[in-house]
Image: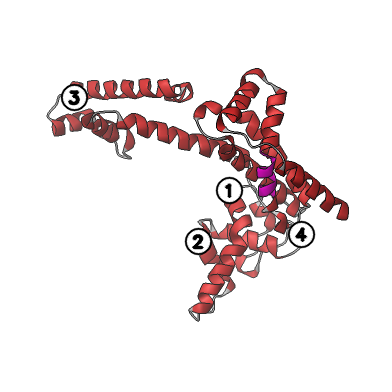
């Protein structure tokens, strides 16, 4: 333990002494790694951001994992971020990297929390890292109001607060309450004999994929909103009614409303889409491909 502590302090001191990169230098290093696989540039970029990785790792000490291991996992997340970072998107590396670092450390904590995996879906991850905080807040609120919540009522409120299914709350409450159980053990007397094996995690996307998809979706939405803003009001209206509504309008119904022929509405829609395509193509070839 003393050796681990000394290693932690040594790594922290080394990270704190690393250089602070300005935006231009940071971008040049990222481009050198992306375009030329310049390992020296990649190592310099990573070393300059290890203080960020150590800071994120420190937030997870309360889960009982060795700090040294947490820092190593944070470093792996930082390396993944450096490998996937696109400097042409216009944001700083730290903004992008923090999500990969956090995802990597969370995965490690959940893998090592128990011999039986706590869970891998997004709702289970949210529960693992937020259940106790939300439960404590709900219990304080209930106490202030003089309300005595049963265990089932408390779990119902937690499910609503975090926005996850009640069965996930019940599963996670049991997992965090004690040591490992048999997969054939029942969760509680209120579960009508349901066994733990019935709720094993599925094979949905893991944290790194979720982070990447979330980031790309947000960027795509911003580009689309900007492209829509360049259209004329009538063109925006036609596209909203034809493409963005759940119950999309027909060309004929829009023509009747706007006093235009069905063919004219189709021409305006096609012209508006072409304007957006050109706008998006100028900003990102990736988005252009998505629209094909």
**Coordinates of residue 238 in the picture (x, y in percent):** 24, 31
- Structural distance between the alpha carbons of marks 1 and 2: 15 Å
Residue that appears at 56% across and 39% down: 95
Colour mapping used in the image: secondary structure
In the image, which disc is placed on residue 262?
3
Q: Residues within 10 Å of mark 3 (few under 14, many from 20)?
A: some
**Coordinates of residue 89 in the picture (x, y in percent):** 50, 29
Local SS, label 2: helix
Q: 273 or 230, which is in the foreground?
A: 230
Labels 3 and 2: the sequence-earlier one: 2
Labels 1 and 3: the sequence-earlier one: 1
Q: Is residue 75 visible?
A: yes
Residue that appears at 50% across and 61% down: 161
Residue that appears at 52% across and 37% down: 215
Question: Which tag is nearer the camera, tag 4 or tag 2?
Answer: 2
**Coordinates of residue 82 in the picture (x, y in percent):** 64, 31
- Structural distance between the alpha carbons of marks 3 and 2: 48 Å
> Mark 4 highlights which residue?
180
> Mark 2 highlights which residue?
161
Question: Which tag is nearer the camera, tag 1 or tag 3?
Answer: 1
The secondary structure that most of the magenta stretch takes on is helix
Q: 46 or 143, which is in the foreground?
A: 46
Q: Residues within 10 Å of mark 4 (few under 14, many from 20)?
A: few
Q: In the displayed structure, would residue 142 be above or below residue 54?
A: below
Tell me: 289 left or right of 67: left
* Callout 4–callout 1 Cβ contact below 8 Å: no
Q: Residue furthest bottom?
A: 146
Q: Quadrant of the N terminus?
A: bottom right
Labels 4 and 1: the sequence-earlier one: 1
- Structural distance between the alpha carbons of marks 3 and 4: 66 Å
> Mark 1 highlights which residue?
122
């Amino acid at each position: 333990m003393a050796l681990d502590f000394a290693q932690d302090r040594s790594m922290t001191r080394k990270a704190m002494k690393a250089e602070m990169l300005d935006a231009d230098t940071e971008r040049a290093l990222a481009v050198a790694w992306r375009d030329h696989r310049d390992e020296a540039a990649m190592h310099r970029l990573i070393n300059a951001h290890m203080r960020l990785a150590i800071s994120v790792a420190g937030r997870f000490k309360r889960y009982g994992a060795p700090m040294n291991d947490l820092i190593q996992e944070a470093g792996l997340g930082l390396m993944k971020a450096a490998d996937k970072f696109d400097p042409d998107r216009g944001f700083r590396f730290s903004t992008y990297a923090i999500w990969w670092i956090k995802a990597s450390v969370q995965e490690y904590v959940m893998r090592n929390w128990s011999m039986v995996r706590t869970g891998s879906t997004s709702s289970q991850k949210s529960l693992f890292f937020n259940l106790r905080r939300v439960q404590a807040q709900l219990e304080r609120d209930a106490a202030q109001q003089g309300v005595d919540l049963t265990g089932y009522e408390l779990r119902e409120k937690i499910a609503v607060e975090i926005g996850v299914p009640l069965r996930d709350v019940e599963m996670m409450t049991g997992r965090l309450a004690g040591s490992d159980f048999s997969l054939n053990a029942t969760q509680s007397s209120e579960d009508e004999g349901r066994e733990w094996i019935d709720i094993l995690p599925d094979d949905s996307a893991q944290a790194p994929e979720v982070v990447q998809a979330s980031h790309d979706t947000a960027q795509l939405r911003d580009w689309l909103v900007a492209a829509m803003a360049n259209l004329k009001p009538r063109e925006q209206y036609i596209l909203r009614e034809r493409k963005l509504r759940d119950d999309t309008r027909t060309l004929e119904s829009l023509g009747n409303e706007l006093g235009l022929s069905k063919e004219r509405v189709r021409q305006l829609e096609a012209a508006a889409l072409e304007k957006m395509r050109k706008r998006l193509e100028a900003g990102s070839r990736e988005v252009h491909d998505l629209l094909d």
